[in-house]
Amino acid sequence: MSLNGTYDPDNIFAKILRGDIPNATVFENDHILSFMDAFPQSKGHTLVIPKTPSRNLFDTDPGVLVKLISKTQIIANAVRQTFNPDGITITQFNGAPAGQTVFHLHFHIIPRYKDMALGSHAGGQMADFEDLKEQAAKIRHNLP
Ligand code: 5GP
């Protein structure tokens, strides 16, 4: 999928937003949903998405982006307190050639641990849902 195109209301994150697919929720308000990545690249890999439908950074209202990035900072800080990683990578991909696989805008919060290789992007093993729910609860506990 290129940068241009129409929003597919049946993409995986749209289904998660509708409640058609379960998720391990970290945070939710009227504008934002945050949940654990089902194929984590490291322990604590968390996603933050706007509820407003958009494919990528370019077709998103700037007001939505402001809410999204400020909430991403808050959630990343809770991830940091929860897992005490040595670093945190925050990524956001636009278009399939850039690595995007789900075409609903999202930020990745990926904790990094010294001497631990990063798992593959969107191609690793599916995590145990109960583990993810436990991790989400721990992160939630550290949210302001
Ligand atoms: P992208 O490649 O678009 O930047 O990231 C999409 C992310 O969504 C990937 O990290 C992938 O592991 C994650 N993902 C794919 N399917 C699901 C799913 O059904 N549930 C959750 N929680 N994450 C998913």
Image (tube, helix red, strand yellow):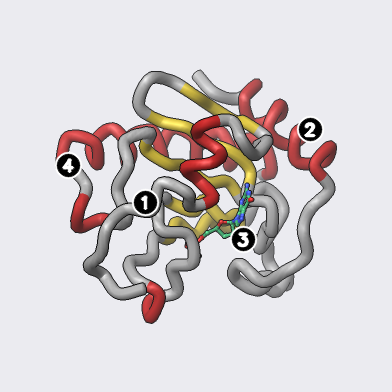
In this figure, what is the number of numbered marks?
4
Q: Secondary structure at mark 2?
A: helix
Q: Nearer the viewer, residue 90 or 37?
A: 37
Q: Position of residue 73 (x, y in %)?
A: 40, 39
Label 3 sits on residue: 112
> Label 3 CB, ligand 1: below 8 Å?
no
Quadrant position of residue 31: top left
CB of mark 4 near ligand 1 (< 8 Å): no
Q: Amino acid at mark 2?
A: Glu
Q: Mark 1 or 3, which is nearer the eye?
A: 1
Label 3 with label 4: CB-CB less than 8 Å: no
Label 1 – label 4 distance at C-alpha:
11 Å
* Residue placed furthest toward the bottom: 97
User: Residue 4's x, y, as percent?
Assistant: 22, 67
Crowd tier of the residue under label 2, counting other residues whose Cα lies within 10 Å: few below 14, some 14–19, many 20 or above: few
Estimate the spatial distance between the alpha carbons at disc 3 and disc 4, rounded to whole Å.
30 Å
Q: Earlier in the sequence, mark 1 or mark 4?
A: 4
Q: Residue at x 77, y 58 (%)?
A: 126
CB under 8 Å between callouts 1 and 2?
A: no
Q: Quadrant location of ligand 1?
A: bottom right
> Are the residues at dot 1 and dot 4 in contact (C-beta closer than 8 Å)?
no
Q: Which mark lies nearer to you, 2 or 4?
A: 4
Type of amino acid at the residue the image marks with label 3 = Arg
Tell me the amino acid under the disc marked 4: Asp
For the residues labelled 3 and 2, the Cα–Cα distance comes to: 19 Å
Which of discs 1 and 2 lies nearer the camera? The answer is 1
Residue depicted at x 79% and y 53%: 127
Q: Which residue is mark 2?
A: 134
Q: Residues within 10 Å of mark 1 (few under 14, many from 20)?
A: many
Q: Residues within 10 Å of mark 4 (few under 14, many from 20)?
A: few
Q: CA distance from mark 2 to mark 4?
A: 33 Å
